[in-house]
Image: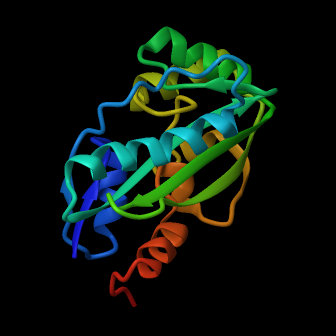
Amino acid sequence: MNLILASTSRYRQALLSRLNLPFEVIRPEVDETPLLGETPIELVQRLAPMKAGAVAARKPDAWVLGSDQIAELDGDPLGKPGHRERAIAQLSAMSGRTVAFHTAVAVAHWDGPILTSLDTTLVRFRPLLPDEIERYVDAEQPFDCAGSFKSEGLGITLFTAIESRDPTGLIGLPLIETARLLRDVGFQLP
């Protein structure tokens, strides 16, 4: 069975490789702009299957895995910061607060229904001093990460707790649900 990851995220690629399944990577080329009034959960639940479906339509001989993640603070989405100043602003806003990270995953084939799942992880940030935030941002430069941190690296020092059913969901691809969905469509996993 052919498997394609509809994402160019190096984090998702590294996570998916942990399942020991060969896969190809294809950029999904979908518009990720939120719709008017769309909540963060609605956004990821729309984008993950849209990404998987867009690639499945171009590759009818493969199963396609799509995923999307967004951080939510007070009902508002926090995307990837893109640069230092925005990362500092995001971490400052999250200081002493709890942030929800929603990660949707979808598996699609061109001729069938799209299977989906949603993982939500709550991250409790400790109160952060401005110089701590700047040192962290300068050390890891998490500009391509939703929420401006890498929990698998030095970012773990920013938290008081992580509440999750699947710790890989916070990194960008919830492997517990991904493995379940792939087994459901016929992939052989332990």
Q: Is residue 118 left or right of residue 180?
A: right
> Which residue is painted at 47% across and 67% down in the image?
178
> Which residue is painted at 58% across and 61% down in the image?
167
Query: Residue at the top extreme?
Result: 85
Quadrant in the picture for the C terminus: bottom left
Quadrant in the picture for the N terminus: bottom left
Query: Residue at the bottom extreme?
Result: 190
| Residue 106 at x, y percent in the picture | 48, 56
Q: Is residue 165 left or right of residue 154?
A: right
Closer to the camera in the image, 73 or 110: 110
| Residue 135 at x, y percent in the picture | 50, 23
Closer to the camera in the image, 157 or 34: 34
| Residue 179 at x, y percent in the picture | 45, 74
141 over 149 or under it: above or below: above
> Which residue is painted at 81% across and 26% down in the image?
74
99 over 14 or under it: above or below: above
| Residue 21 at x, y percent in the picture | 25, 74
180 over 172 or under it: above or below: below
Colour basis: rainbow
The number of numbered discs placed on residues in the rendered structure image is 0
Q: Is residue 169 left or right of residue 82?
A: right
* Residue 100 visible in this rendered orientation of the protein: yes
135 over 179 or under it: above or below: above
Query: Residue at the front extreme?
Result: 111
In which image quadrant can residue 84 be found?
A: top left
* Residue 154 visible in this rendered orientation of the protein: no
> Which residue is painted at 29% across and 54% down in the image?
5
